Amino acid sequence: MSFTPKASASNVPTTGVLLVIGSCVSLQIGAAFATQLFPHAGSFGTTFFRLFIAGLIMIAAARPNVRAWDATQWRAVVLFGLSLGFMNSFFYAGIARIPLGTAVTIEFIGPLLLSAFLSRSARDLVWVALAAVGLALLGYQSLTETALDPMGVLFVLCAGAFWACYILTSARAGKAVEGTGGLAVAIFIGSFVPMPFGIAKAHVVLADHRLLLLAVGTGILASVLPYLFEFLALRRMPSNVFSILLSLEPAIAAIAGWILLGQPIGLFGGIAAVLVISASIGITTSSNRRARLEAQPALQPVTA
């Protein structure tokens, strides 16, 4: 007699790992593309184009049957879209003022705090404290070396808060609407958040084919491909391994900012990224360990 095993890290195919890494890399290259649009469209205009274009592409691919949605489904998708729109708007406003790697490191505090709050475990507070030390190092670096723009830091902290909202609302929308239709519509709805502030410079992008291609590239690299890669990866690996791999995002962002934008990582910035990554992996591993322990009594025996 044996128990039906849950997918584990030992049977994760290389393809799944490469898809997650590809998602992180594509997302950060898209963010680097976006910074080239900032001087012409501004951060809010860039966010609008990114989400609007990505939403149109994904709606065309998913073809959601929105006429069949009820009020509960629409409410879940709209809240998901608003969270996504505010998260991206604040994040792009932040990376217009502070380095990409630093911004992603700070933004990660949002989901870390959410995980600690939902777990209600004293042990997880240690991981949050570790991430706080990383933030303190960034603050020290700002005081002693290259100063970080306070508004940039504030924008990214807001992005982190909406990232936590995004996690909660995406789970609710995923349960309410099957498939990727809810995600596609949510991205399109999210584009309306930065639109009032970014639409004024839309004519600048539309009048220049190079900027328009850059906007399309940003939408594809920063939204369409990451979501597609993550969707495919989750079909090939357990969610706990997926979450741990996503924790590498601050390091990938720092490398992308260094290579593509010439933004130095710095000693304290590198240590801060390592601490936040360690905290993210620690809290993810701890949460999944508790989930497995809680699920054990519910396992049903299967005859071999």
Image: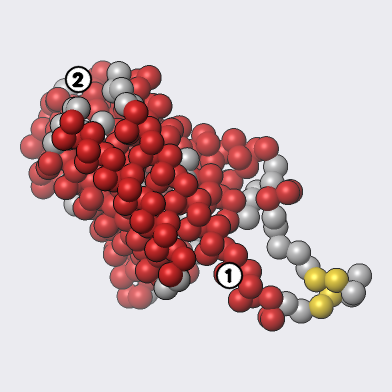
**Mark 1 is on which residue type?**
Ala
View extreme (left): residue: 200
State the residue at coordinates (76%, 79%). Answer: 300
Q: Nearer the viewer, residue 110 or 52?
A: 110
Residue 86 x/y as whole percent? 23, 52
Q: Gap between marks 2 and 1, in whole Å?
A: 52 Å
- Earlier along the polypeptide chain: callout 2 or callout 1? 2
Q: Quadrant of the C terminus?
A: bottom right
Q: Which residue is mark 1?
A: 291
> Left or right: where does residue 50 sit relative to residue 119?
left
Residue 179 higher or lower than 76, as above or below? above
> Left or right: where does residue 296 sit relative to residue 188?
right
Q: Which mark is residue 275?
A: none
Residue 287 x/y as whole percent? 52, 64
> Left or right: where does residue 246 sit relative to residue 134?
right
**Mark 2 is on which residue type?**
Asp
Residue 266 x/y as whole percent? 32, 26
Q: Quadrant of residue 82?
A: bottom left
Residue 7 higher or lower than 214, as above or below? below
Q: Quadrant of residue 71?
A: bottom left
Q: Quadrant of the N terminus?
A: bottom right
State the residue at coordinates (48%, 58%). Answer: 283
State the residue at coordinates (35%, 60%). Answer: 113
Residue 280 higher or lower than 66, as above or below? above
State the residue at coordinates (58%, 46%). Answer: 233
Secondary element at tag 2: loop
Q: Which residue is mark 2?
A: 208
Q: Nearer the viewer, residue 11 or 141?
A: 141
Q: Neighbour class for label 1 at 10 Å: few (<14), some, many (≥20)?
A: few
Residue 78 x/y as whole percent? 29, 63
Secondary element at tag 1: helix
